[in-house]
Image (cartoon, helix red, strand yellow):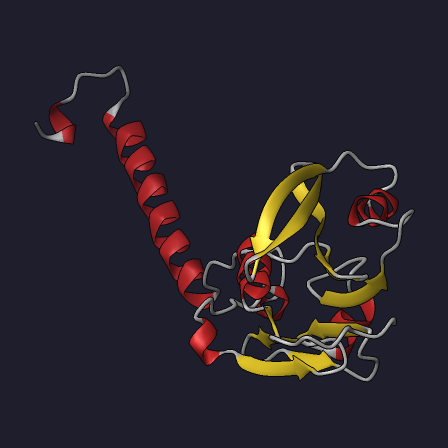
Amino acid sequence: MSLWRVKHTLSPVVEYAVVAVVASYGFLAIYFSSLQPLATATGAPALALPQPVSLDTDAWSRYDDAAFGYAFAVPPGWTADAGQPASVRIGRSAKERAEAPNEGEGIQIQAAALGERQQVENIAAADFAGMRPALYDVSVDGRPALFAVAFENARIARQAVYIPDGDLALIIRAATTDPAVFATFVSTVKFYATETPKTQP
């Protein structure tokens, strides 16, 4: 049906004026949008987005800690600061390695002494003081271990794995590291088959 055949109470002069105004607004909108395209606001620059981490461990780099008899692997682009064998820090940058394991994406591997009054449960309780961690019995390279994780605002705030190894414990700590990356990292930890006792850190 033609617009001109719609019944209304407008006079022909007013009708032509309304059609002309609407048409002119449409043409002006098209003209101004061609001069300045529509701009959209972004929440953060693209550089601030987290970089994806490959979970294909075949592409990861291997590291050895001969002092404490274990090896591990890190994703491409990550490095390990193994200056102190008793406390290895892993991350994508010097800042991540420095912040690990209290905040950020970095990971720390620490060797700690065990004794009659110092078991992995005591270390975990000290690490998660003031939090309500969930505790799970897990296995790392065939050895029994304790996994602890605490949440804050429905997000992981802290996670750690405690692996008893004679009179030592190997502790893998992280803060907000992606749980899939953390679990894959833990799966790369392998212990040397050795009969010599490990030294105290």
Task: Answer left or right for 146 relative to 139.
Answer: right
Task: Answer left or right for 174 relative to 22.
Answer: right
Residue 59 vs 9, above or below: the answer is below
- Asked whether residue 57 is in view, the answer is yes
Residue occupying the point 57% across, 75% down: 73
Task: Identify the image quadrant of the N terminus.
Answer: top left
The number of callouts visible is: 0
**In front: 15, or 153?**
153
**In front: 56, or 4?**
56
Residue occupying the point 47% across, 66% down: 55
Q: Residue furthest left?
A: 1
Residue 82 vs 11, above or below: the answer is below
Q: Where is residue 114 in the image (x, y as percent from the top left)?
A: 85, 57
**In front: 46, or 148?**
148
Task: Identify the image quadrant of the C terminus.
Answer: bottom right
Q: Position of residue 155 (x, y in %)?
A: 65, 42
Task: Answer left or right for 81 relative to 138.
Answer: right
**In front: 12, or 173?**
173
Residue occupying the point 92% across, 47% down: 117
- Asked whether residue 152 is in view, the answer is no
Residue occupying the point 14% across, 29% down: 4
Q: Residue furthest front?
A: 195
Residue 170 vs 8, above or below: the answer is below
Q: Position of residue 104 (x, y in %)?
A: 73, 61
Q: Which residue lies furthest to the right in this view?
A: 117
Q: Where is residue 72 in the image (x, y as percent from the top left)?
A: 61, 74
